[in-house]
Image (cartoon, grey):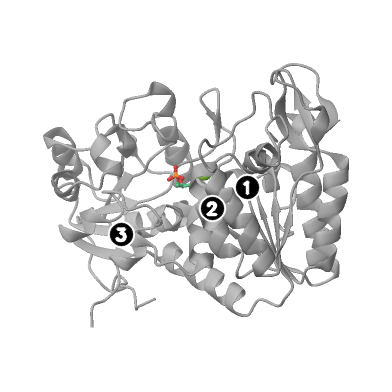
Amino acid sequence: MGKLKALDKNLNLTDKRIILRVDLNVPMLEGKVTDKSRINKVIPIIKEFTKKKAKVILISHLGRPKGKIDEKLSLKPIAPILENLLNSKVYFSNKSYGSTVIEKSNEIKSGEVLLLENVRFNREEESNEGNFAKELAKIGDIYVNEAFSCSHRAHASVCEITKYIDSYAGKLLFEEVNAINMLTNKAEKPISCIIGGSKISTKIGILSNLVKKMQTIVIVGAMANNFIKYKGHKIGKSLFEKNQENLLKDIIKKCATNNCKLILPEDVIVAKSFKSESKLKSLNKIDDTDLILDIGENTVNKIYKIIDESKTILWNGPAGYFELEKFSTGSNKIAKKITENTKNKSLTSIAGGGDTIAAINKFGCSNGFTYISTAGGAFLELLEGKILPGIKVLEINE
Ligand code: 3PG
Ligand code: MG
């Protein structure tokens, strides 16, 4: 990775409009934020700019609305939370670009904040469109990327925008990249990776590259459903990614040739719906009406053994639908076991991802890890050795 462009500490920012690309993609349940970690993390950064009398324009996405307006994914509920934490005025704009937004960005007083609506309500964001990026760039004088967790996305507010405005890598972005690089470059073997969560499409491709760097890969959560199905078991109504057979075959083959152990669930917790009773089942007992929502006890014990054998553990993605108590056991036990070993056996542990952080916080383990990153997918891609598009555009061309 080349050197990244950093903002000069002594630059006079008075009345300058700073576009801060942040990641306010926080876990929500029925319109309420269930974990504020990602918000808390950017508060000191925003404060630094407001103290310097800048006008701060916040751009973020929430969820995956796929270019359409979806009220459930509005960033509006985040504005009062920010206002409360920042102790300064936060305006919300229900548009994320255009003349009214530009006007508002000029109108707000220095030291005030303007939060723009979910940038992914615009189709052009994900297609990284030039004209759209140009419009976004008009809302500020300087652009700072503080969303390391989005930097694996070649999207307009992360990549293309940097062509049209003076752009810099933010302090948090530097910190995260450095911490992950440092910890993973000197990582002691055996290194194990626990991958779960529901973003199957994001992570499934990453697996085949991670195989070369890990001694063990543990697959849990919705990610595992693909493998369970591939092995010939029923997965009922569970989440899975279609047409991935060749990729799965390749991952399994690569694990064998690279001497990487692949650990899959042996038993699972199922239910007929989120609301109905949960049941422990072995894989061959899963039926067409089941939903797999957590890993079972035998699987947990197997993971305990892997954690005990490891010198370095990387964890991204919960083991089940931990938001509900009855499906939280797997994630809870993983979090507690890693915490215990990090404290007693000097295990190096790195966790990342919005939901993973939420789970870790919920189980009271936030002090139990060597490092916790805000990023999930970006963290895994950095680990793979990939050049992240959002970081590439901030490199100094020498
Ligand atoms: C994340 O939660 O990992 C980031 O906010 C990126 O979200 P995405 O996977 O929907 O691009
Ligand atoms: Mg996420």
Left or right of 61: which side holds 28? Answer: right
Left or right of 158: which side holds 149? Answer: right
The residue at the point 66 percent across, 62 percent down is 255
User: Relative to 348, does residue 119 appear above or below in the rendering?
Assistant: above
Pick whichever, 276 or 118, lies toward us. Answer: 276
User: Relative to 4, does residue 27 appear above or below in the rendering?
Assistant: above
Q: Which mark is residue 83?
A: none
Q: Earlier in the sequence, mark 1 or mark 3?
A: 3
Residue density around tag 2, few if under 14, some if 14–19, many if 20 or more, within 10 Å: many
Type of amino acid at the residue the image marks with label 2: Gly
- Residue tagged by mark 1? 317
Whether residues under marks 2 and 1 lie with C-beta atoms below 8 angstroms apart, the answer is yes
In the rendered image, is residue 349 in sight?
A: no
Type of amino acid at the residue the image marks with label 1: Gly
Q: Nearer the viewer, mark 1 or mark 3?
A: 1
- Residue tagged by mark 3? 144
User: Relative to 30, does residue 386 appear above or below in the rendering?
Assistant: below
The residue at the point 54 percent across, 37 percent down is 241
Q: Which mark is residue 376?
A: 2
Where's residue 154, x and y in %? Answer: 32, 53
Pick whichever, 296 or 130, lies toward us. Answer: 296
Where's residue 370, x and y in %? Answer: 68, 66
Question: In the rendered image, which quarter is residue 233 located in?
Answer: top right
Q: Is mark 2 within 8 Å of ligand 1?
A: yes
